[in-house]
Amino acid sequence: MTAQAAQPDARAARARPRKPTFTVTARGGGEARVWVGDCRTALGGIPEVAGGTVDLVFADPPFNWSRDYDRDRTGEAWDDARMSREEYLAFTFDWIDLCAQSLRPGGAMWINIPDDWAAQIACFLQGDLKREPSVRMELVNWCVWHYRFGQNTKARFINSKVHAFYFVKPGGERTWNPEPILEQSDRRAVYYDPRTESKKDGLPAGHRVPMDVWYGKHWGRVQGNNKERRHKHDNQLPEVYLGRVVLACSNPGDVVLDPFTGTGTTAVMATAFGRRYVGTEWSRHNAKRAIERVRLGPVRTEADIRGGTTAIHQPRRANPNSVSAGEPG
Ligand SMILES: C[S@@+](CC[C@H](N)C(=O)[O-])C[C@H]1O[C@@H](n2cnc3c(N)ncnc32)[C@H](O)[C@@H]1O
């Protein structure tokens, strides 16, 4: 499972931009700055990265899946199919190392990654491979994003998930805000269990921290006529996903870093909630469109992110607490 040292990639040597290529202030008050270039070089030009003062990293890298990142035919897109397995893992460990170094002690790193690479990344960050990480990170949660409409196949089970790793850098206080992301417990939504209305864990009645498998309304892949969809980009994450991560793992004013800005989902949600966004992006075209999206702000509301239910069963019986008898609550 050990990655061999890869050949140096000429793309990483592209000149490091000293100033952000694009800057924008969002309606929510947060500022977004994006540096165009290969993250392995461009990250070093970001003052908060160099200073190790980033509070939260979210990374959704290219998966080496031959994704077309140039559907506008600008000729400047990342080639997503040119790396061998060894090269891809070396590339991955390189950017992960840079992101881990950028974090303050106690800062969080989230990585969105499919089955192909999940095991290697989990082992690498915990120091279980021959190549040592620059920082050994602690695994807080191994979440799964479950989406509908995976690629259809008859040959095996259909893929319908991506792994969402939540690591923390040891040595400092971890930011954890459960309140803004709570959802209704099944005890309230399905069973009308009175015990959940007088909870002793300090959380509001009938609510719980979401489970580590994430799904539900607005959690599908962003495709087709989805209201959030930025056309001509294959790999856009749902706003509710980044909303949950940003609200739970950072505070207003904190610095949020995404080395793979893409359509700007992290930037949009971080700035909407008053965080300071810094990011890198290989394609100038994508970066420009992400900045335009930050200006527009999110499509989903805060209510879309919290308070709902992900129960998969219908209520068992009529709600005994309902005012009009016989109405499910
Ligand atoms: C999977 S997409 C990110 C999508 C993003 N999470 C969103 O919701 O829009 C990966 C992005 O990383 C960019 N990229 C690929 N390799 C890169 C590199 N070495 N440095 C910086 N950006 C890169 C691609 O151009 C693409 O826009």
Image (cartoon, helix red, strand yellow):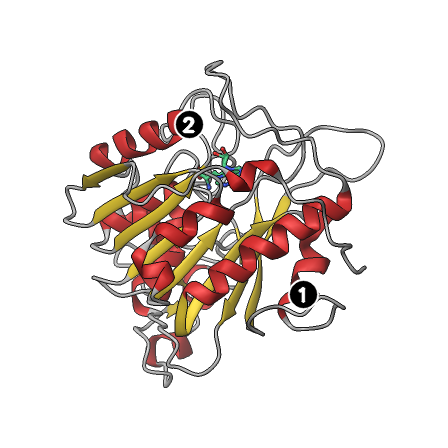
Q: Residue sitting at 52 percent across and 33 percent down? A: 235
Residue 325 is at least partly visible in this image: no
Between residues 269 and 22, which one lies in front from this camera angle?
A: 22
Image side of residue 202 versus residue 283, left or right:
left
Q: Are marks 1 and 2 in contact (CB under 8 Å)?
A: no
Q: Nearer the observer, disc 1 or disc 2?
A: 1
Residue at 33 percent across and 81 percent down: it is 198
The answer, for residue 272, to whether it is visible in the render is yes
At label 1, the amino acid type is Phe
Mark positioned earlier in the residue sequence (1 or 2): 1
Q: Quadrant of residue 54?
A: bottom left
Q: Position of residue 154 (x, y in %)?
A: 82, 29
Which residue is identified by label 1? 124
- Hey, which residue is sitting farthest top in the picture? 73
Q: Secondary structure at mark 1?
A: helix
Q: Residues within 10 Å of mark 2 (few under 14, many from 20)?
A: few
Q: Is residue 300 above or below residue 227?
A: below
Q: Percent from the top left, x then y, of residue 10?
A: 59, 37
Which corner quadrant of the image does residue 26 belong to?
A: top left
In the image, 56: left or right of 323? right
Residue 49, by quadrant, is: bottom left
* In-front residue for pair 236/135: 135
Indicate which disc residue 250 carries.
Answer: none
Residue positioned 44% across, 67% down in the render: 108
The dot on residue 226 is: 2
Q: CA distance from mark 1 to mark 2?
A: 36 Å
